[in-house]
Image: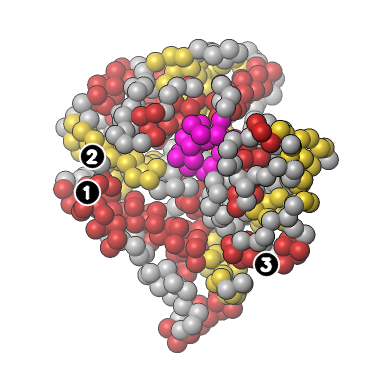
Amino acid sequence: MAVLIHYNNENFSINFEELPHNANAGYLFSLPQIKPRPLCTGMGKCGRCKIQYHSPVPMLTPLEKILLSKEEQEKNIRLACKHPLEDNLELSIFDDLQQNASQFNLQLPENCSYETAVLFIDLGTTSIDFAVQNEQKVFTQGKILNPQMFAGADVMARLYYEHFIEKQKPSRLQSIILEFLQNLCTELEKTRIAVNEIYLAANPAMTALFLGESTKGLLEAPYYLENKGSTHYHFNKLPPVFIPPQMSAFIGADACAGLAYILQNYPDLDNFLLADLGTNGEFIYYHDGQVYGASVPLGPALEGVGMRCGSAVHGKGENIILSFSLTPFGLSFECKGNAQFICGAAYLSLLNILLSTNCINRQGLFQNNQPEQVSPLAKKLLTRFKEINGEKRLYVTDNLYLCAEDIENILKVKAAFSSAIELFMQKNTIETIFLSGALSAHIPLDILENLGFLPKNSKAKTKIIGNSSLKGLFSYYTDRELIHKVEKISAQAIIIDLTNQDEYNTLYINNMHF
């Protein structure tokens, strides 16, 4: 009673009786023999769980008939997330273009003298940003895809995996991050840089998974936060790991680090809104020392994850379209290498172009059926419009495209994010909006306002501060009193549950347009 797997020119089998009950074939990608890759957790959007069945071969699902090419269908290729694991299966798993995206590529000075430094880690749901520095200089910094993404692209998928799929302790979700940190510290030691402390910020769920702590309070209502942070932890083969203050079940050390950065660098402000644009939208409104916090689920679409041709940016961003622009000859794009994926910022720049040229309307619908309403340039763009297996697509290269489902995914994120900001602005006079998140640093405010992520005429009061989590960790390091200040503020914070407010839900529905 076994499942036989062919992978990377090797064969291995797993005992069917030891597999989780009712698991689908997507579970195979969590096995340690398979290199981790980013998956969309059974939504059938990423297409990176393709496997080839040898026996028995399941029937095609309606979704597979759309997403898989005729050639793939004829070769018995299926999406693993759409079929249950069965006894006596024989199948092949393919390499993935992004499975090595969790490998860091350090850019370090040669022949440097022996130095000590601190490793700052922003442990995001989709990606991990890191910097190695001390108060004098930055030695290196980088970004990789979070290798935990084999368990799904969002927090709830990770929690589900931890509670209902994983049987081993410590879980692979914890051990794979510890292994990454150990390898990074080892590589730094080879270049004569000794890491003597780690500062790590993440949302509450990612923090608990990293520490191997209970996530019960984050899994179901009523939600609560067990670990308030401000504590050092000790692991084998690692220097002490400091977890900064956390505010609530959905506002973690990453958002609080952003607050610390603002308090340090804008000390004269006594009224501002920090809005973090990530897989979870976190909002901190600060007024004369009092803090109001809120969060809304956004999902990974703005990072490019779960989008049909999408990818989060990692490493040097090779082979990923980083942005689009419009020329007299049509669409142009920026890409280092061969265009194989589209990042989140590029999707937004593309949508802005299509919206500005009337190729799509404010509801996100393609205007290809109404040529009289579009400009000559738009008609030129729409020559790349195709309908494949009943699905409308606008191709930007021969292989990469934007589909209606992608537009809907971004619209949902836009509605959730803009509704939260709008509700805060209705109830408070906000002098400054700080827009944080690694994605925000790559999108002009003009585009965010035109697409409706920001309220009209709010651009003048908005400042983009990029990855404030990583910057805030350095603020903590250089000013230890900030830790106690943010800890005190967080303890007195008033947490607002936006998603249970009728006002927010009405705004969300009304904001389902660009």
Name the chief secondary structure element in magenta: helix
Question: What amino acid type should be assigned to the residue bearing mark 1?
Answer: Gln
Sooner in the amino-acid sequence: mark 1 or mark 2? 2
The residue depicted at 64 percent of the width and 53 percent of the height is 79
Sooner in the amino-acid sequence: mark 1 or mark 3? 3
Mark 3–mark 2 distance (CA, rounded to whole Å) = 46 Å
Marks 1 & 2, CB-CB < 8 Å contact: yes
The picture places residue 399, in percent across and down from the top left corner, at 67, 64
Mark 3 lies on residue: 398
For residue 477, the mark is none
Q: Residue furthest right?
A: 9
Neighbor class of circle 1 (other Cα within 10 Å; few <14, some 14-19, many 20+) is: few
- Looking at the rendering, the stretch of residues picked out in magenta corresponds to 143-166
As displayed, is residue 362 above or below residue 500? below
Mark 2 lies on residue: 496
Question: What amino acid type should be assigned to the residue bearing mark 2?
Answer: Ile
The residue lying toward the viewer, choosing from 24 and 194, is: 24
Mark 1–mark 2 distance (CA, rounded to whole Å) = 9 Å
Mark 1 lies on residue: 501
Sooner in the amino-acid sequence: mark 3 or mark 2? 3
